[in-house]
């Protein structure tokens, strides 16, 4: 209960201080934030992070693609054209064959 009271009190104080600061201060903060985001170092870091993310994502997709067919085929053979496990077949080879053919 004490946490809720503290939270509500913080909201009230923030509202009052924000209302006193007014629109001019808001516009000043907004302009400063925009100039920061549009600065060359921040833009460079953003582009570098995006490139890193694309590279890492591509590697992850490739790794998953290498291992997914065998694992799916092993655990869900009847869903991917394999035999039911109670027939004596595990179905992994049939499922992998379908993936190798390009489904």
Image (cartoon, helix red, strand yellow):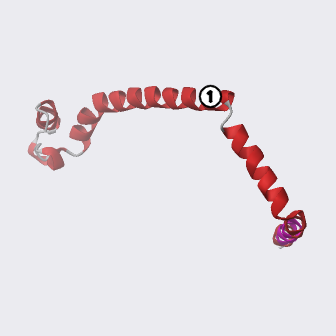
Picture quadrant of residue 57: top left
x and y percent of residue 90 in the render?
16, 39
The stretch of residues the image draws in magenta is: 8-15
Tell me the quadrant of the picture where the C terminus can be found.
Answer: top left
Q: Is residue 85 visible?
A: no
Please state if 39 lies on the left or on the right of 83 as rendered.
Answer: right
Is 11 in the magenta?
A: yes
Circle 1 — which element?
A: helix
Picture quadrant of residue 3: bottom right
Q: Nearer the viewer, residue 81 or 86?
A: 81
Majority secondary structure of magenta residues: helix
Q: Is residue 39 above or below residue 8?
A: above
The residue depicted at 21 percent of the width and 39 percent of the height is: 73
x and y percent of residue 42 in the render?
66, 32
Picture quadrant of residue 14: bottom right
Check disc 1 and report the residue beneath it: 45
Disc 1 packing (10 Å; few <14; some 14–19; many ≥20): few
The residue depicted at 49 percent of the width and 27 percent of the height is: 51
């Amino acid at each position: 209960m004490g946490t809720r009271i503290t939270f509500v009190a913080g909201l009230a104080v923030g509202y009052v201080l924000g209302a006193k600061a007014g629109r001019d201060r808001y516009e000043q903060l907004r302009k400063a934030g925009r100039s920061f985001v549009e600065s060359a170092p921040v833009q460079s870091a953003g582009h570098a992070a995006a490139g890193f993310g694309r590279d890492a994502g591509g590697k992850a997709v490739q790794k998953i693609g290498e291992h997914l067919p065998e694992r799916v085929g092993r655990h869900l053979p009847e869903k991917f054209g394999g035999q039911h496990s109670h027939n004596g077949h595990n179905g992994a080879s049939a499922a992998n064959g379908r993936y190798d053919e390009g489904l």
